[in-house]
Amino acid sequence: MKIKTVLSITAWIAVLLLCVSCGQSTPTADGLKTITLDVVTPEETVTFTLETEAQTLREALEENDLVEGTESEYGLFVTSVNGVVADEANQEWWCFTKSGESLMTGVDGIQIADGDHYEITLTSGY
């Protein structure tokens, strides 16, 4: 009877380990991620697919030379995306969203994950 108990426990542990390993099919925060990025201006929308090991959106954008800006106490203030400069005189600025939802932090604090979809839209008016 003890052998049956040990075999039963071993079988349950094997099933548990199999379930746990199957649930880890997505990359970790330190692994390769693929994200999609739409840069939207009045003239056009350009879509980029980025493969990166970066952990934040800022890192991914900078390693692909897609943004420029100035440092502030809150992180990078983005002034240019894909070579398009926001004209402060016309109250233009870059609005960052994720799958159409507003983001409550700057690009420095946005943690990215595999499959994320971001939009960067040139916006007018404060």
Image: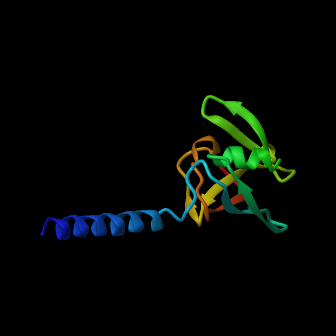
Residue 91, how many percent across, how many down?
Answer: 74, 48
Q: Nearer the viewer, residue 42 or 53?
A: 53
116 horizontally vs 89: left or right: left
Q: Nearer the viewer, residue 77 or 58?
A: 58
Residue 33, how many percent across, how many down?
Answer: 65, 58
**Residue at left offset 60%, top offset 44%:** 106
Asked where in the image residue 27 lies, by quadrant, the reply is bottom right
Quadrant housing the N terminus: bottom left
57 horizontally vs 22: left or right: right
Residue 3, how many percent across, how many down?
Answer: 19, 67
72 horizontally vs 85: left or right: left
The correct choice, above or below, for 69 with respect to 120 in the image is: above
**Residue at left offset 40%, top offset 63%:** 20
Asked where in the image residue 10 lies, by quadrant, the reply is bottom left
Q: Nearer the viewer, residue 32 or 37?
A: 32
As drawn, which residue projects farthest toward the right?
83
35 horizontally vs 40: left or right: left
